[in-house]
Image (cartoon, helix red, strand yellow):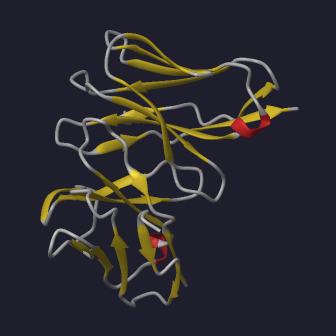
Amino acid sequence: DTGVSQNPRHKITKRGQNVTFRCDPISEHNRLYWYRQTLGQGPEFLTYFQNEAQLEKSRLLSDRFSAERPKGSFSTLEIQRTEQGDSAMYLCASSLNLVAGELFFGEGSRLTVL
Amino acid sequence: QKEVEQNSGPLSVPEGAIASLNCTYSDRGSQSFFWYRQYSGKSPELIMFIYSNGDKEDGRFTAQLNKASQYVSLLIRDSQPSDSATYLCAVASNTGKLIFGQGTTLQVKP
């Protein structure tokens, strides 16, 4: 399978715990994006990378959220001290460049915070 | 004001009819516009993009762009039940990110 892969697909955690999600993009794609989506809403931008450089992070994003892409390949998104409001689907997408605008999305990682 | 606005719907059309989906955006400097389709429980997938004012056709889909009015639309001709999904309008910012609207749910009734 050469698509975008996300793990784990589902995560249930207790409030206050830390969670980490991993995204493996399509191999030749240099851009990687993280979005968050809740029911009835469109994907909300969190952050994106070009190769290993984090080019932008949402101003609305709490300091509890951090993302890395250490070697320009896979990426991790960590949420520290989770809150119930963090419950959502976390979507990763990759692309060759934004001019074409074709983001290829993974199947998402669903987080439930109890 | 949201950066990208869509009517959440649902928009219900009979099979074979034309479905018209609309989107407005706030950044007058935006240059690239996209329509994604998202089936229930699935991730979004790109169906069309448009950069220039006017119409762009691809099969049963036509995207329309009016930069002066900051308005983008998607027409789906001969709507099929399989077109039932949420349609997301997205705009590329000058910083390189893609900003999505909340999506419009389309229901095509047989």
Task: Name the side, left or right, on which A62 lies relative to B38.
Answer: left
Residue B40 percent coordinates (x, y): 66, 53
Quarter of image, res B28: top left
Residue A88 percent coordinates (x, y): 50, 67
The total of numbered circles placed on residues is 0
Position of residue B45 relative to residue B52, above or below, is below
Task: Name the side, left or right, on which A28 lies relative to B34.
Answer: left
Extreme right residue here?
Answer: B110
Extreme front residue here?
Answer: A1
Residue in the picture at 51% in, 31% down? B6
Residue in the picture at 50% in, 46% down? B45
Position of residue A28 relative to residue B54, above or below, is below
Q: Locate the N terminus of chain B and report the quarter of the image it occupies.
A: top left
Residue B22 or residue B52, whichever sits in front: B52
Residue B104 or residue B31, whichever sits in front: B31
Q: Locate the C terminus of chain B and report the quarter of the image it occupies.
A: top right
